[in-house]
Image: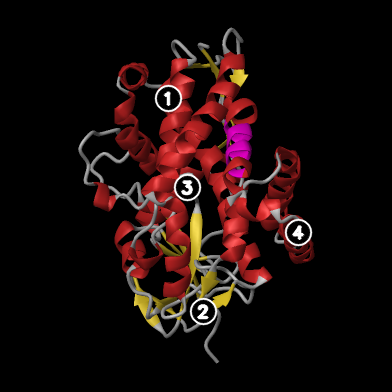
Amino acid sequence: MTPPTRADWTIRDAATQADPRAAYDRMREHCPVAHDTAGHWTLFRHADVRAVLLDHTQFSNRVSQHVSVPNGMDPPEHGPFRHLIEPYFSEQRVAWFRPLCRAIADDLAQPLQGRDAVDIMADFALPFALRAQCAFMGWPQSLQQRLQDWIQRSHQARFAQDRPALAQLAAAFDAMIDEQLAQRRQSAAAQEADITSELMRSRVNGRPLSDAEMASILRNWTVGEVGTLAAAIGIIAHYLADNAALQQRLRAQPEQLYYANDEIQRMHNPLLENRRRATCPVELGGRQIGQDEQVVINWVAANRDPRVFAEPDCFRWGRNPQDNLLYGAGIHVCPGAPMARMELVEVMDSLLQHSHTLQPVAGRPVLPARYPASGYAQVWLTGF
């Protein structure tokens, strides 16, 4: 019998959680393909991550027994579902949502003016993400608190590896979705009113979507988007507060936010990881990965790899955008990237226009977010 592979690290230890980016950087340089205490393999180098992203034959996205549309699907099943959801993030859809997105950002930014200190995460980033996603989906704003509570409890359960709690949370989210679907089925007027209703009328392979498929899509569009969008706002705001010249340049030239936002997030990715499953024995970085073993992509470390990004901690204009894995690569590249980029441009421009010189609050250092989140739990700023 082959002896079990020794664990190289654990993501949950106190040192890693105290300074996650530094810990991931160390792993990338000293153990780039690492076996963890859960029995998974984590990839930290850009080249290894990109190789896995582009090889859906040896690395499957089907890592769970639960329905996951379309991220948990492989070809040929993946294609029709991907084709179904892409129009929801089209240029026309982005243009439709832009003014509403800006109105939400301005409504949240205006009350910050004149305050001595603001926790960007609690007072701006998370409220914006929740309101924007409810507005996009056509859900009542009263769902915001339930979604926020669900996300917080989900993070706690994942950190604790509490499987019974995770199962209960999955059922609770499905119940929220069931409520929204039932309301629309009972109201003929609502059937034409919003994106959730539109999704209910969609067909794939000539048939309607099942409730489980719709719940999976809506979960990805809400829970996943809320967490990463809020994290991105905090990451960008914190970086600009520490870099006054760039902040002023973007305040004067907001069209440059499209590039600047991506480059800042390259240095600190708001999404920590995704998973794949090896379909056969494979070697990566000199390590032997067995069939059906899970491979974890660490986006944060990969996008800070000095083999690809010279001086990775430095903001640089003109880096090759094809190297930035912020939204992934390959057939599973994030379909919502155009919408996310627009949202971040509008929300950051609003924050800059409603402030004069963002600065960190003395004596209140940022608090890193705890696994499985990325970014910050608290970011105290002044200058409004």
Question: In the drawing, what numbered circle is on residue 349?
Answer: 1
Label 2: which residue? Answer: 206
Q: Is mark 4 on a helix, strand or loop?
A: helix
Which numbered disc, 1 or 3, marks the residue closer to the eye? 1
The disc labelled 3 sits on which kind of residue? Ala
Disc 3/disc 4 C-alpha distance (Å): 30 Å
* Rendered location of residue 248, percent (x, y): 34, 16
| Part of the protein shown in magenta | 125-133
Question: How would you classify the magenta stretch by its main secondary structure?
Answer: helix
| Count of numbered circles on the image | 4
The disc labelled 2 sits on which kind of residue? Gly
| 2, 66: nearer the viewer | 66
Q: In which quarter of the image is residue 132?
A: top right
The N terminus lies in quadrant: bottom right
Write the residue at 53% across / 45% down.
228
Write the residue at 57% across / 11% down.
113
Q: Residue furthest front?
A: 188
Q: Quadrant of residue 74?
A: bottom left
- Please tell me which of labels 1 and 3 falls first in the chain: 3
- Please tell me which of labels 3 and 2 falls first in the chain: 3
The disc labelled 4 sits on which kind of residue? Leu
Disc 3/disc 2 C-alpha distance (Å): 48 Å
Which numbered disc, 3 or 2, marks the residue closer to the eye? 2
**Are the residues tagged 3 and 2 within 8 Å (C-beta)?**
no
The disc labelled 1 sits on which kind of residue? Asp
* Rendered location of residue 47, percent (x, y): 29, 61
Q: Is mark 2 on a helix, strand or loop?
A: loop
Label 3: which residue? Answer: 23
